[in-house]
Structure formats: C-alpha cells, structure tokens
Image (cartoon, grey):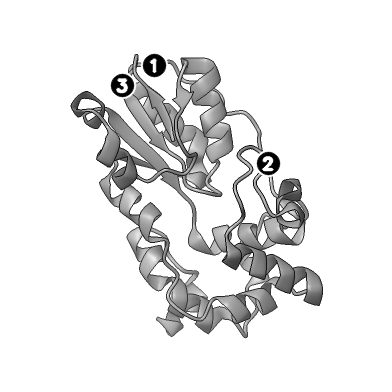
Amino acid sequence: MVINHRHRFCYFAIPRTGSQATTKLLVEEFGSEVILKMHMSYDEFQQQATEEEKAYFTFCAVRNPLDSLVSSYFKKKNDHNGRFSRGTFLRTGKSIAERAMNEYRFITENDATFAEYFQHFYTEPYHIPRHESTVSQVDFVMHFERLQIDINLVLEELNLSPSLLPTHNTTQERSSVFLEYYTPAIIPQAVAVTKDIMKAWGYDFPISWRAYL
C-alpha cells in the first residue's frame, strides 16, 4: 500500500486495477512511500496503524471482474515479467501462490483458451474477501475504466493538483474488448460465479446475459 504523511492519505492497491501506475504517480509526484506489502488490505493496515494514520483519507480502485479475469489469464499465458516460470515475484522474491501456479501450468501445458481456463478453475462464486473488505471500507473507490478521472477527483479532495497517470504494466496480446473472450458456452457460468461481486462493485452484465441471473 501507499501512504503519505504530509497529505494524510492511504492508497490500497488491488491487483489489475492500474495499481502500478497509480503508485508510481503518488510516489514520484507527491512524495508518498510504499510500505510493507504492495497489496495490503484495509483491515491489515488498521491493525498496525497509529490513531493519527487511521484518520487519513483512504482510497482504492476496482475493475470489472469479468475484465480482471481475462487480464489474469493473459498474465499467466504470457508469463508476465517471467514471474510464473520463475515462481516468484521479481520485486520482492515472494513465491507465487500455488493456485496461480496451477493455473499457469494448466494454460501453458494445454495451450488452453480463456474459455477452457475459466471453465476449469471458476466453478464456485468468485470472491476476493480481503480486497472486497477494503473496497467496502475506504473513503473513495476509483474505477479502472475511468481511472484518470477518478484519481484527479481524489487529488482534488486532497487539495492537490491534477496529474497525468503514467502508462505502466500493460497486459500483452489481448483485445481491449474483454467480453469477446466469453464464449456462449461459458456465459451462464460467468454470470453464476461473478454476480455477487459484480453487484457489490457496481458493474452490470451485458443486457443479453441478464436472462441467466
């Protein structure tokens, strides 16, 4: 996570929401610092924050879960930054979670399409509890789809000047139209497993999918 004591804010990074670009901006332009682990949750921070820090302005970002799942697939398919073939994160040296490694091996060993990957691994309701808890508790939730607008709203709230987000950490070899990867065969499954988090984060399914709700 990112903290700024001068301007009294905390940014909680959630994977695949433009967190690298947002962190880079907050550190380089506004003198913030990255503390502890990058994807620390709100609850984890509260357990060790001072009373003064607990009063800081807090924010994070979300992304359409359907889009995020496609991004996750392509990061594994393309061995993003060599992390999966290496088995560790480049910056920290921390081991990749076993589930993610299993997904990587399934994709690479079977040359699996997104639909095959999704059908195999996403059979239960899709939840990321620690990040969902963060989203429900911060002062402001940005959306990946309008991240530049939202980061400027945050900066305005903090009485800071608007600033342009850098381009960082883009996912290779994927269409920008993420719905293209959801074949007709997996749409009912996609609705069933993501409907709760889609609703909680304020996203709607395509009209043609709503018959499966």
Q: What residue type is labelled 1?
A: Leu
Secondary structure, mark 1, is: loop
Q: How far apart are marks 2 and 1 (CA)?
A: 32 Å
Q: Distance between the residues labelled 2 and 3?
A: 30 Å
Please state which of the two labelled residues, at mark 2 or mark 3, is closer to the viewer: 2
Q: In the figure, 159 relative to 54: above or below?
A: above
Quarter of the rendering containing residue 202: bottom left
Q: At 36% across and 70% down in the image, what residue appears?
A: 196
Secondary structure, mark 3, is: loop
Quarter of the rendering containing residue 44: top left
Q: How far apart are marks 3 and 1 (CA)?
A: 12 Å
> According to the image, label 3 marks what residue?
8
Q: How many labels does the image show?
A: 3
> According to the image, label 2 marks what residue?
90
- Name the one closer to the observer, 142 or 129: 129
Secondary structure, mark 2, is: loop
Q: Please tell me which of labels 2 and 3 falls first in the chain.
A: 3
Q: At 45% across and 76% down in the image, what residue appears?
A: 193
Q: What residue type is labelled 3?
A: Arg
Please state which of the two labelled residues, at mark 2 or mark 1, is closer to the viewer: 2
Please state which of the two labelled residues, at mark 3 or mark 1, is closer to the viewer: 3
Q: At 26% across and 41% down in the image, what residue appears?
A: 47
Q: In the figure, 44 relative to 58: above or below?
A: below
Q: Residues within 10 Å of mark 3 (few under 14, many from 20)?
A: some
Q: Which residue lies furthest to the left in this view?
A: 51
> According to the image, label 1 marks what residue?
160
Q: Please tell me which of labels 3 and 1 falls first in the chain.
A: 3
Q: Position of residue 179 (x, y in %)?
A: 61, 66
Residue 83 shows up from this direction? yes
Q: In the figure, 86 relative to 191: above or below?
A: above
